[in-house]
Image: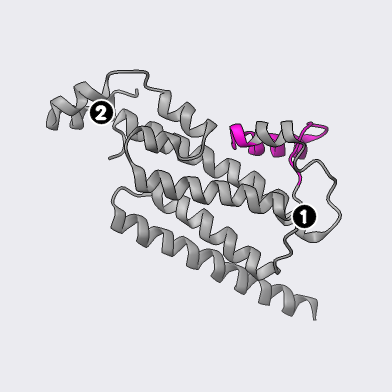
Amino acid sequence: MATTPNKPAAAGKPAATKKSSQGFVYLPLIAGWLIPGAGHFLLRKWIRGTLIAVSIIAMFALGLAMQGKIYTSAQDILDMLGVAGDLGNGLLYFLGRAAGWGAQPEQITVADYGTKFIVVAGLLNIIAAVDAHNLRTGRKS
Amino acid sequence: MLHPSHFATVLLFALFASTVFGITMRDTPRKMFRYGAYCFVLFIGSVIVFSWVMFLIAR
C-alpha cells in the first residue's frame, strides 16, 4: 500500500529512488517528532525545517510564558486528549516534565490560551513529522 | 510572564499554525506561501466574524 505512490518517482528518477530506499525509512518521522524540524533537516530541507522548528518551538515557549499547563496525568477524557497533544512535542514535552515547567494550575485566562498553544504545538509537530515521512517515502516532493 | 491581548494571541496562533499548514499541505514554495497566507486570513477572518456574531447575540 505504501509502495504504490512511489512508482511514478521510481520510473522517472531511478538513481534518486535507489538512494531514498537506503537507511531506516522511519528515521525522519521519529527525528521530526523528537525534535521539531529535525525530520526535514535530515532530508536537507533546510528552510522548511527551520520554519517548522521556529514555529513549533515558539508556540511551545509562548505557551509556557503565558503560564500554560503541561498535562501530566489523564484523569478524564479531555486530560487524555491533552496528554496526547502535548506528547506530540517530543523531547520538549519530556524536558518540560523533567524541569517542572507548566506544572502550576491555570489561574488566569491567558494561562488557558497558553495551555492550548502547547497542545497545538504538539499537534502541528505531528503533522510536520508525518510530512517528513512522506518526503522520505516519495509520496511528496 | 507574558500577558498578550486576546487578539495578539490569535495573531500569533494564526501565524505559526499557518506556517506549518502551508509547508506541510503543499508541494512548491509558491503554493506553500499562498496556502499559508490563505489559512492565516481564514483564521483571522473567522475570529473577527465570530466575535461580531457573539457580540450581537449577547446584546
Q: Nearer the viewer, mark 1 or mark 2?
A: 1
> Mark 2, chain letter?
A
From what the image shows, is residue B16 above or below residue A100? below
Mark 1, Cα crowd under 10 Å, few <14 / some 14-19 / many 20+, is many
From what the image shows, is residue A98 above or below residue B24? above
Q: In the rendered structure, which segment of residues is drawn in magenta?
A: A69-92
Q: Residue furthest top?
A: A23
Mark 2, Cα crowd under 10 Å, few <14 / some 14-19 / many 20+, is some
> Mark 1, chain letter?
A
Instruction: Name the image quarter holding the C terminus of chain A.
Output: top left
Secondary element type, mark 1: helix
Residue annotated with mark 2: A6
Q: Is residue A27 magenta?
A: no
Q: Residue at point 42% right, 47% down?
A: A50
From what the image shows, is residue B52 above or below residue A63? below
N-terminal of the pair, mark 1 or mark 2, is 2
From what the image shows, is residue B21 above or below residue A80? below
Q: Is residue A118 visible?
A: yes
Viewer-side residue, A28 vs B53: A28
Secondary element type, mark 2: helix
Residue annotated with mark 1: A111
Q: Is residue A83 magenta?
A: yes
Which x, y percent locates residue A128?
Answer: 46, 40
Q: Amino acid at mark 2?
A: Asn
Which x, y percent locates residue B55?
Answer: 73, 77
In the picture, measured across the screen, residue A38 lies left or right of residue B45, that is left
Q: Residue at point 33% right, 30% down?
A: A136
